[in-house]
Amino acid sequence: MSTHSFVAHFLKQNNYLETLKAFEREHGSPISTETGHDESLDQIIQDRVSFSKDFEISDLSLDDANQAIVDRELPNWSTPYPSTKHKLEEVSGLTVSAAIVGDKVIASSNDGSISVYDEEGKRVSRKERFLGGVVAKAVVGVGRNDVLIVGMNGIIHLCRVEECDLVKLSDLALHRGLVVDCGYAEVASDRYVATVGWDKMVKLVKITNDKIEEIAAYKSTLAGTCVGVCGYAGRVIVVLGRTESTLLDVLAWETAGTQGPELVPVYKISLNDAEFMANGFTPRCLSVAQGATKPLIAVATSQEPYMRVIVVSLSKEAIESKDGKVRRGQILTNTNSMAPQDKFSQPLISWRQPRASGVWAFGEDGVIRCLDVKKQQVVAAIDGHKGRVKCVAMGANMVTFGADREAYRWTE
């Protein structure tokens, strides 16, 4: 993305072709009219003018409604918390993803195997080439005994944990290529999974009994980095983070025409009120928890040298407006996690269960940091792994897997 491309795009869209030629001639080389961005120069300027009119510096502080959310729905970090580690046995290879399902831990390895561990950390089964040699990109618990295993080839598999065994129930070819991220939520007793792939497609899947079904799809103009799903205002809501943008896209699953329910973009949440349109960071990881009255969305950013964790919520009025506009002043808290990272890092965070009483931040340095997002500070740091925390399985307690090829079960 460049300023020259935005200007060239504006000239072409408005049929100022001779002016565009003169612009390129003075520039000295051809200028691409493809901006790689879903906002035109007109929209950016209109947004900037609106921002200047509607907001004074004093307005950037929390309004009464947002402050009420912080006071009512963001508990402080409390003690005791999981801080004693117990080593899992027979961890082989580099663990890519893991989930807690019932009293079992399901973990996928970079060698294509799937391992099942019991509540004591003992490996009770291991399945070689479980997906036929394809590595599982993500393992997601989707109910009491069910788990969704997402292959790097874009195929998702619904499985069930039966005692110490893992049984395949059904599968679905969902994306053309790698699935970047996925999120799960139960809404009105129904089970939903949202995914985003390298193909820039956002898919919404419903799990019914032993079947998985794609029920909606949305094509993003920018590559997705993270996705979450939740229920709010009587709707299934998908929240999407993308590259080259400090905005979160909010999509609602609802009837928009004659084709039945679909994913409709309803509005955008700004994560960067301090610097207008300055894409100094992008959202890289989402964790969604249900507060007392509305969802709480924790967002890990790509900022350097330390990851920041921004907490926002959803607006019922903005969802119902369906105007697609950018909403500012939505940030509830913004915490420096002190977790070091660079441009190649993949941030990893998770709400503390079960009451969203703080956020876990898992660092490239192997340290597990406890964030009191209400106070906006790090309240504790736990020595976890030698090197990056690769993935985490979260439940009442948690299990972490590191780049050091070790795994630990954490208890209070």
Image (tube, rainbow, N blue to C red):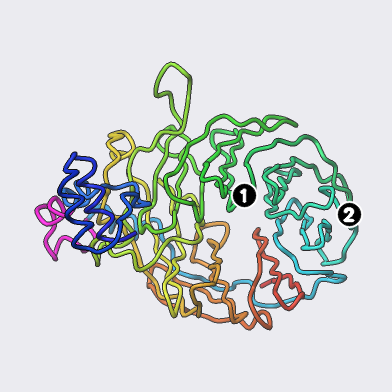
Vertically, is 283 above or below 260?
below
Q: Main secondary structure of the magenta part?
A: helix
Displayed quadrant of residue 404: bottom right
Please state the horizontal and vertical placement of residue 358, each as a whole percent of the image. 49, 66
Quadrant position of the N terminus in the picture: bottom left
Q: Please provide percent x and percent y for residue 387.
A: 65, 81
Circle number at residue 127:
2
- Relative to 360, 34 lies left or right: left
Against 79, residue 253 (above or below) is: above
The disc label shown at residue 179, or none: 1
Q: Which mark's residue is nearer the viewer, 2 or 1?
A: 1
Residue 58, magenta (yes or no): yes
The quarter of the picture where the C terminus appears is: bottom right
- Front one among 66 and 237: 237
Q: Which of these two is toward me, 64 or 211?
A: 211
Amino acid type indicated by mark 1: Val
- Left or right: residue 202 versus residue 61 is right
The residue positioned 76% from the left and 55% from the top of the image is 135
Any part of residue 232 in sight: yes
Q: Residue at x 60, y 72 (%)?
A: 81
- In whole angstroms, how far apart are the C-alphas of marks 2 and 1? 22 Å
Q: Residue at x 52, y 41 (%)?
A: 202
Query: What type is the residue that disc 2 sits on?
Result: Lys
SS for callout 2: strand
Q: Is residue 71 visible?
A: no
**SS state under label 1:** strand
> Which region is colored magenta?
48-63
Mark 2 vs 1, N-terminal side: 2
